[in-house]
Image (cartoon, rainbow, N blue to C red):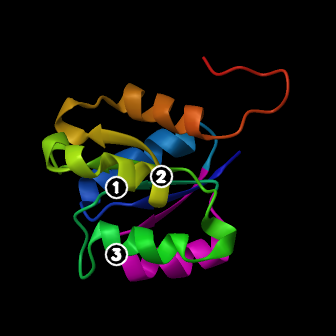
Amino acid sequence: MAQILLIEPDRVLAETYYRLFVGDGHSVVVCAGAQAAIMAADQIKPDVVVMELQLIEHSGIEFLYEFRSYMDWRAVPIILQTQVQPGEFSANWELLRSELGVSQFLYKPHTTLHQLQRAVREALPQPAGLETS
């Protein structure tokens, strides 16, 4: 079981993703904004972060910089599940990947729940001898 920090301002999507991940046996903490997510991360020590870039109060990029400023969170995989079109970040993908540690960029309108589920499974470290399906 993994600890997932889900940062999603849309209540319906947050509930949908929550059910998906809990159904996979994970513990999930849902936050709508960046500041609440930082406080939650400090409490739960997430194994993976799934987040929207368009957040309330602070941008997702600001969250990423703050999150990565903490030594304990530098290796935590981050999956962007966002409404921001991929073309808007194509020039900055290297920055997102190398400096901010984003492991995957998923565009919500083109991503199924199964694809999101698979992305989380792939981001989590696997116990020896087990493979993802």
Q: Amino acid at mark 2?
A: Ser
Disc nearest the viewer among 1 and 3: 3
- Residue 103: mark: none
Disc nearest the viewer among 2 and 3: 2
Circle 1 residue: 14
Binning the other alpha carbons within 10 Å of mark 3 as few (below 14), some (14 to 19) or many (20 upward) gives few
Residue displayed at 24% across by 76% down: 56
State whether residue 104 is above or below residue 101: above
Circle 3 residue: 62
Q: Secondary structure at mark 3?
A: helix
Of the pair 11 and 38, the residue shown nearer to us? 38
User: Along the horizontal axis of the image, is 93 left or right of 120?
Assistant: left
Query: Are dots 1 and 2 in contact, CB under 8 Å?
Result: no
- Extent of the magenta region: 27-46
Circle 2 residue: 98
When asked about the image quadrant of residue 63, the answer is: bottom left
Gap in Å between the C-alphas at discs 2 and 3?
Answer: 16 Å
Q: Which part of the image, by quadrant, shows the C terminus?
A: top right
Disc nearest the viewer among 1 and 2: 2
Binning the other alpha carbons within 10 Å of mark 1 as few (below 14), some (14 to 19) or many (20 upward) gives some
User: Along the horizontal axis of the image, is 4 left or right of 111?
Assistant: right
Q: Is residue 106 magenta?
A: no
Gap in Å between the C-alphas at discs 1 and 2?
Answer: 27 Å
Q: Is residue 40 magenta?
A: yes
Q: Secondary structure at mark 1?
A: helix
Of the pair 98 and 77, the residue shown nearer to us? 98
Question: Residue 51, image x and y in percent?
Answer: 38, 56
Q: Which part of the image, by quadrant, shows the N terminus?
A: top right
